[in-house]
Image (cartoon, grey):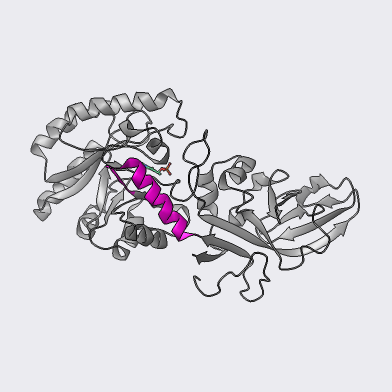
């Protein structure tokens, strides 16, 4: 889609493309966010977490852009995401699979040069066996669980790991890693608990460098940086911490077209189940995106969109393909068929929309799926 039709101005008519939702991804802003995070963690390096299609923004475009900014470490969640990305990046880019080896893909991983994160003793043994069969040394990352109970070797497996390493080897551990559960809250005691646990681990395995911080972790300071940070959301303009001003530059804009405008009298029901009833004569517009486009149904009667800086509240339920908004605050005829309203942009951040929807920026971003026309700038 990129380049087929360039967006000229906000609110331009949409007939020329036929699309009714317009997602703009600012690759320059993404690059500046990367540069900023790299500078923050220097002399450590910044990787890029590009799982879930780079949080929905397009792993191909995002990863190739960040490669040009000097990024050489890319984390995905799943093996197939790594397979997709591998041919798109030069050979000196390393792709890591966070969810680790899955039974049956070990050989493919080795052949494609994809680096698994080893999360358990059996995975270590599997990878070591493949190395032996291929008569090669295979790279890996070792993940330890420091308190999230999600992925990685639990404390009670560390002694066995140390002895396994002595006879089942053939694995080159590039670094060890762990993941923070509460990094978005700088005051959470859990951050220090996990850091202390990580220090215990590095004392037991002093030969390996450390990779620890996600976006929030970067802002917890040097003691969390190790040699490599793993930011995701901050690259894409999301706030790395819930408490401070967001230091990142927005990357995503979303405009949606108006498909119908009407004026209704007082006492009119709006939307499914008639959950909203107008209290006075009201001008309404229906816009062409709904929960199938990643605008959660929980925005029903809570969220808003914007036009000319004016807040236009969502009235009634969010439908699958449309949302009705109250446009009474705008001059008459300001919005007509094909006009655009802002869903994400200078008036409404990802965090604003996520808060109204009762979720987090991550879920909003990864939900912005295929029905929008995408433009990369
Ligand atoms: C998703 C993920 C990240 C990135 O987290 P952000 O909060 O988006 O920066 C880093 N590390 C691991 C293990 C992850 O699963």
Would residue 326 be seen by someone viewing this image from the given angle?
yes
Estimate the x, y position of residue 169 in percent, counting from the top left. Answer: 11, 42
User: Nearest the camera: 238 or 74?
Assistant: 238
Say how many tags the image has: 0
Above or below for 21 versus 266: below
Q: Residue at x 77, y 64 (%)?
A: 260
Estimate the x, y position of residue 206 in percent, counting from the top left. Answer: 16, 31
User: Nearest the camera: 324 or 292?
Assistant: 324
Relative to 175, 219 lies left or right: right
**For residue 61, what is the image quadrant?**
bottom left
User: Nearest the camera: 74 or 128?
Assistant: 74
Above or below for 32 versus 261: above
Q: Quadrant of ligand 1?
A: top left
Q: Residue at x 29, y 50 (%)?
A: 96
The secondary structure that most of the magenta stretch takes on is helix
Estimate the x, y position of residue 368 in percent, counting from the top left. Answer: 55, 55
Q: Assess whether residue 109 is covered by the magenta stretch.
A: no
Relative to 12, 328 lies left or right: right
Estimate the x, y position of residue 373 in percent, counting from the top left. Answer: 56, 66
Would residue 77 be seen by someone viewing this image from the given angle?
no
Q: Which residues are magenta?
A: 26-47
Q: Assess whether residue 28 is covered by the magenta stretch.
A: yes
Relative to 73, 241 lies left or right: right
């Amino acid at each position: 889609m990129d380049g087929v039709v360039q967006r000229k101005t906000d609110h331009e008519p949409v007939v020329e493309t036929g699309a009714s939702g317009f997602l703009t991804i600012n690759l320059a802003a993404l690059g500046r966010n990367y540069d900023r995070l790299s500078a923050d963690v220097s002399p450590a390096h910044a990787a890029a977490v590009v799982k879930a299609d780079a949080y929905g923004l397009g792993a191909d475009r995002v990863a190739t852009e960040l490669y040009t900014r000097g990024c050489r470490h890319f984390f995905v969640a799943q093996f197939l995401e790594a397979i997709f990305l591998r041919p798109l990046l030069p050979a000196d880019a390393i792709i890591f699979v966070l969810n680790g080896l899955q039974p049956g893909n070990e050989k493919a991983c080795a052949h494609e040069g994809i680096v698994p994160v080893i999360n358990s003793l059996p995975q270590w043994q599997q990878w070591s066996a493949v190395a032996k069969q291929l008569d090669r040394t295979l790279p890996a990352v070792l993940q330890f669980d420091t308190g999230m109970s999600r992925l990685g070797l639990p404390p009670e497996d560390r002694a066995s790991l140390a002895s396994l390493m002595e006879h089942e080897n053939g694995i080159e551990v590039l670094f060890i890693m762990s993941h923070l559960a509460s990094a978005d809250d700088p005051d959470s005691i859990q951050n220090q608990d996990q850091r202390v646990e990580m220090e215990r681990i590095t004392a037991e395995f002093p030969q390996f460098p450390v990779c620890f911080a996600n976006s929030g972790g970067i802002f917890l300071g040097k003691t969390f940086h190790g040699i490599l940070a793993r930011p995701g959301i901050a690259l894409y303009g999301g706030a790395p911490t819930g408490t401070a001003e967001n230091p990142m530059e927005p990357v995503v804009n979303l405009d949606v077209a108006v498909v119908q405008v009407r004026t209704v009298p007082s006492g009119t029901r709006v939307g499914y189940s008639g959950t909203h009833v107008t209290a006075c004569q009201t001008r309404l517009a229906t816009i062409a995106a709904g929960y199938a486009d990643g605008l959660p149904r929980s925005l029903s009667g809570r969220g808003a969109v914007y036009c000319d800086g004016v807040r236009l509240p969502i009235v009634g339920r969010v439908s699958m393909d449309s949302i009705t908004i109250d446009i009474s605050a705008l001059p008459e005829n300001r919005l007509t068929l094909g006009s655009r309203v802002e869903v994400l942009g200078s008036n409404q951040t990802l965090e604003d929309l996520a808060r109204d929807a009762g979720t987090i920026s991550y879920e909003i971003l990864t939900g912005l799926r295929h029905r929008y026309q995408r433009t990369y700038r």
